[in-house]
Image: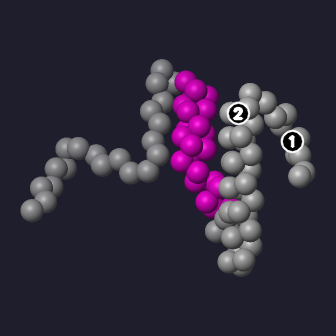
Amino acid sequence: MRQNNNNKQEKRGLTVEVRNGDFNFALRKFKKKVAEDGILQELRQREAFEKPSIKRAKAKKAGRARWLKKLAQMNGDVPLPGNKTKR
């Protein structure tokens, strides 16, 4: 059975505590938590319907990018941001 504890507030979702009135610091922390959790990315994905074939193509492209990044790290090559090599 569940016990009701009215003294303790239940925290749901992402929370950040503002300390010493430093709102800017708390806002930066909150933005970082939102980014790490992927909330905005998921929201953008759900905004519009995406055909399953396009989902598969994006997943395949992302997987290939991860693989190429891993190969570059193993070889000691450091790829420049935005530089795409075609094979």
User: Above or below — where is 54 with respect to 45?
Assistant: below
Name the secondary structure under disc 1: loop
User: Above or below — where is 10 with respect to 52?
Assistant: above
Q: In which quarter of the image is residue 41?
A: bottom right
Residue 74 or residue 9, whichever sits in front: 74
Residue 68 or residue 49, whichever sits in front: 68
Task: Using a 10 Å C-alpha cutoff, classify the residue at mark 1 as few (fewer than 14 neighbours), some (14 to 19) or many (20 or more).
Answer: few
Report which residue position mark 1 lands on.
82
**Distance of mark 1 from mark 2, alpha carbons?**
16 Å
Residue 46 location (% of width, % of height): 64, 68
Whichever of callouts 1 and 2 sits on the residue coming sooner in the sequence is: 2
Question: What residue is shown at x 63% (from left), y 54% (from top)?
Answer: 40
Residue range corresponding to the magenta coloring: 22-44
Residue type at mark 2?
Gln
Residue 74 or residue 66, whichever sits in front: 74
Question: What residue is shown at x 85% (from left), y 34% (from top)?
Answer: 80
> Quarter of the image containing the N terminus?
bottom left
Numbered circles on residues, count: 2
Question: What residue is shown at x 57% (from left), y 43% (from top)?
Answer: 36
Q: Residue 68 carries which label?
A: none
Report which residue position mark 2 lands on.
73
- Residue at the extreme top: 20
The colour mode here is one colour
Question: What residue is shown at x 19% (from left), y 50% (from top)?
Answer: 6
Name the secondary structure under disc 2: helix
User: Above or below — where is 64 with respect to 30?
Assistant: below
Per the picture, the main secondary structure of the magenta-coloured stretch is helix
Residue 37 location (% of width, % of height): 54, 48
Query: Is residue 70 shown in magenta?
Result: no
Residue type at mark 1?
Gly
